[in-house]
Image: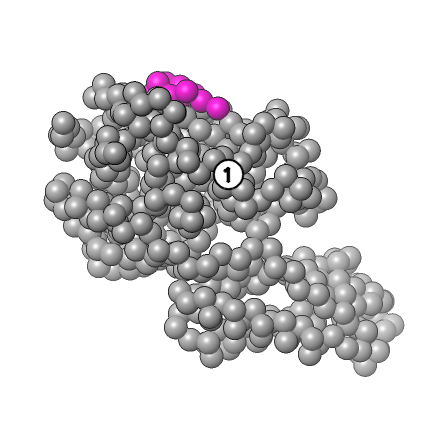
Amino acid sequence: MHVKIDRNLATIQARVESHIDTLSTFTATPGKGTTRLTYSHEDLQARQYLKEKMKEYGLQVREDGFGNIFGKLQGTLKDAPSVLIGSHFDSVPNGGSYDGPAGVVAGLEVAALFAENRLTPKYPLEVIALVEEEGSRFGGGLMGSRGIVGLLDEEGFNGLKDKDGIYAVDAMKKMGLDPSLPKKRDPKTMKAYLELHIEQGPILEEKGIPIGVVEAIVGLTQLEVTVKGQAGHAGTTPMDRRADALVTAAKMIAQFPELAGSEGEDTVVTTGRLNVFPNGANVIPDKTVFTVDIRSGKEEHVQNVIEKVKELAVSYSRNGIEISVEQLLYIQPKEMNKDIVSLLKKTTNELDIPNCSINSGAGHDAMVFSDFTNVGMLFIPSKDGLSHCPEEWSDSRDVANAVQILFEAAKKLTEAE
């Protein structure tokens, strides 16, 4: 049965705005963007709100050993795999209100439409809210989705700690979560995964198109470079006798833009985090640790840049300087499932919503799930192409349009054999 929901667009839009506005209050930096790090007090506030809404919409709620949240609408088929829909709810420091939460909210609203239309699916529908996609606290990123599919094992998780030396398992326990709960999920329990996300770029807004159907997601890697030198007094150590870890790091980082440019084909390299030790104004740094985020649509370019970063490290490892490079994350470029891409395009056209194909330059949980189940993804425009900043904004009407598309697609996926 095709349920007409166009007339409910304003209602969906109002609820979307309410959800996003509420979630945006769970921040450690009020007035300065959203800062909601994994296993923080703000994480707990958001998690309680999401679980409450899931229950309100008739979903059975559980959490796993990573703290991922699942709200399940049971299907009529016994032990059938679920159609998953959602995104992440953590943020970068001083980020925006839409990166991640827009997708979780869309999942909630799809579940709400199932409830309001009294639809019982054959295959279960699961709304999921994932942790630590950004990697802002424990590094690497995509932790929740990688954990679900087994790419992050128990030993690896137990070794994760933040910049203050707090282990992830201890942070979980402190906020009342149980890291001993099951973690890895059998891929056979997942029929498909759908995700809405803001574009985080300018293309859709510049074209005036409200929906992008994602065809592929770029490959990415994250390296962590540690530079060790020798501490000394800022006033009494001659310049030619210094092994300054920060100066060395700065020289390396300054070469990354040229390195990316020479690689071409939209290859990008970013250093977004740099820690200096001992971090004293009058002390020569004896250690710096910084990240190198490398992305490209072609795997060969990612590999080339990794090698060039390692070569740079070797070239600066002299005169009292030691440099090591650790790979925190590596994910190949991913194509979305062609059948689901076709379904999303067909559904969008049937609803008479303008759309176009688009590729993602950012990494998403969808790219992790794509190796284990059928994945589809929608983008909505980002105002001025901005993201990871307080100015990040997307129109709630675009989210509501995406909810309609995902609802129709989820109905088909939860009914089809």
Q: Which element type, helix, strand or loop, lies under badge 1?
A: helix
Please indicate, yes or no, whether residue 112 appears anywhere in the rendered image: no
Asked if 286 appears above or below 102 in the picture, the reply is: below
Q: Is 95 left, or right, of 37 in this rendering?
A: left
The answer to which of 318 and 22 lies nearer the viewer is 318
Please indicate, yes or no, whether residue 295 appears anywhere in the rendered image: yes
The local crowd at label 1, few if under 14, some if 14 to 19, many if 20 or more residues have their Cα within 10 Å, is: many
For the magenta stretch, what is the residue range?
Answer: 52-62
Quarter of the picture holding the N terminus: top left
Q: Is 196 left, or right, of 315 in this rendering?
A: left
Q: Is 234 left, or right, of 392 in this rendering?
A: right
Give the x, y percent position of residue 94.
Answer: 51, 47
- Determine if the magenta segment contains residue 58: yes
At x 84% / y 70%, what residue is drawn?
235
At x 25% / y 48%, what residue is drawn?
339
Q: Is 11 left, or right, of 243 in this rendering?
A: left
| Residue 40 location, quadrant | top right
Count of all numbered marks drawn on residues in the image: 1
| Residue 202 location, quadrant | bottom left
Q: Amino acid at mark 1?
A: Ile
At x 58% / y 75%, what residue is drawn?
308
Give the x, y percent position of residue 131.
Answer: 51, 38
Give the x, y percent position of residue 384.
Answer: 33, 56
- Determine if the magenta segment contains residue 258: no
Quarter of the picture holding the C terminus: top left
